Amino acid sequence: MATIRKRGNRWQAQVRRREHPPISKTFNVKSDAARWARTVEIAIDRGEILSHLNSPQTIETLADLMVQYRDRVTTKKRGSKVETLRINKFLSHPLCKTKVKFVTPYLIAAYRDERLRAVKGETVRRDLTILSHAFNIAIREWGLPILNNPVSKIEKPKPAKGRERRISKEELDALLRGCEQGRNKYLRYAIQLAVLTGMRRGELLKMKWEHLDRKKNLLLLPTTKNGYSRVIPLCGNAIKVLNIIGVREEGFVLDVSENALRLSWERLRNRVGIKDIRFHDLRHEAISRFFEMGLSLPEVALISGHKEPRMLMRYTHISASSISPKLRS
């Protein structure tokens, strides 16, 4: 039930419902207070504001919200390590001391602008995505007594343009030669398989011998970045690399940790003097080559694991000049 009472020169509306925390707000005009109270009551009736019984514990500050989100939601994600680091860093920001009910779009926008002066727009965009999801979960599922997600009201930095770095034959040869001077023997195999299969670094590290079908030249990836399993057809050169490694009945194909592979890659880049290249560029190069071989969009998507065809368009490198000769008058 809603009550409207005068407090000085202003009007306070308060909504009370069984198993819900009291929700109140103050207005300059009584009609605005009454209108807001009706909106809240309708939201409660529709289940848009849930009972406090669903809330894991009291959430007062933004820090409370992010800790709850980190411990209850982030831990269930595949990228939990990276997201946990992002949240832990955010928890040291003064904004986290603000009570949730006082977190406004203005404050979020100020935080966005501050971050943009220090890091790239894509980094800020990811931070805001996490923060926005935390508010959405808390409002819908934990009974956080606010009506709107303040993050949804501000403008986000535009998504970064997809990287289109191709790797030349000379650069690839230089990388492979540079591997001979390093101590990590698996780095060379990882580079070769990345260019031949289009697998991500994490997928390469999860390859297991027991998932290799040697009769059909197929490799099963039970878990991938997008949450789906994937079967990758292997070309003859990829099979040769696996034979050089030494085919076994079980175990990891690349018996190396993620950190060891990352450090070896960084040292290799410095050693050969190609510092603007990323390991993920090897995947981009592989997918670009698939299109150059004449594979169709669905065929490439089957290999790469892309669920959105538009995400693959940047790998086609199609230009108007290349299409013109194919058109008939």
Image (cartoon, rainbow, N blue to C red):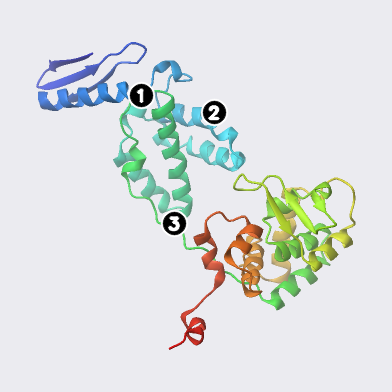
Residue neighbourhood size for the residue with mark 1, other residues' Cα within 10 Å, grouped as few (<14), some (14–19), many (≥20): few
Q: Residue visible at 27% across and 14% down? A: 16
Quarter of the figure that contains the N terminus: top left
Q: Judging from the image, what secondary structure is the residue with disc 2 in?
A: helix
Q: Nearer the viewer, residue 28 or 3?
A: 3
Quarter of the figure that contains the C terminus: bottom left
Residue 47's tag is 1
Position of residue 122 in the picture relative to residue 243 (left or right): left
Mark 2–mark 3 distance (CA, rounded to whole Å): 28 Å
Q: Is residue 252 above or below residue 41?
A: below
Mark 1–mark 2 distance (CA, rounded to whole Å): 21 Å
Question: In this view, which residue lies farthest toward the top?
Answer: 18
Q: Nearer the viewer, residue 195 or 115?
A: 195
Position of residue 190 in the picture relative to residue 4 (left or right): right
Mark 1–mark 3 distance (CA, rounded to whole Å): 33 Å
Residue neighbourhood size for the residue with mark 3, other residues' Cα within 10 Å, grouped as few (<14), some (14–19), many (≥20): few
Q: Judging from the image, what secondary structure is the residue with disc 3 in?
A: loop
Q: Do the residues bearing badges 1 and 2 touch, measured as CB atoms within 8 Å?
A: no
Q: Is residue 107 above or below residue 239?
A: above
Marked residue nearer the N-terminal end (1 or 2): 1
Residue 36 figure quarter: top left
At label 1, the amino acid type is: Gly
Position of residue 259 in the picture relative to residue 129 (left or right): right
Marked residue nearer the N-terminal end (1 or 3): 1
At label 3, the amino acid type is: Pro
**Mark count:** 3
At label 2, the amino acid type is: Arg
Q: Say if residue 184 shows up in the picture.
A: no
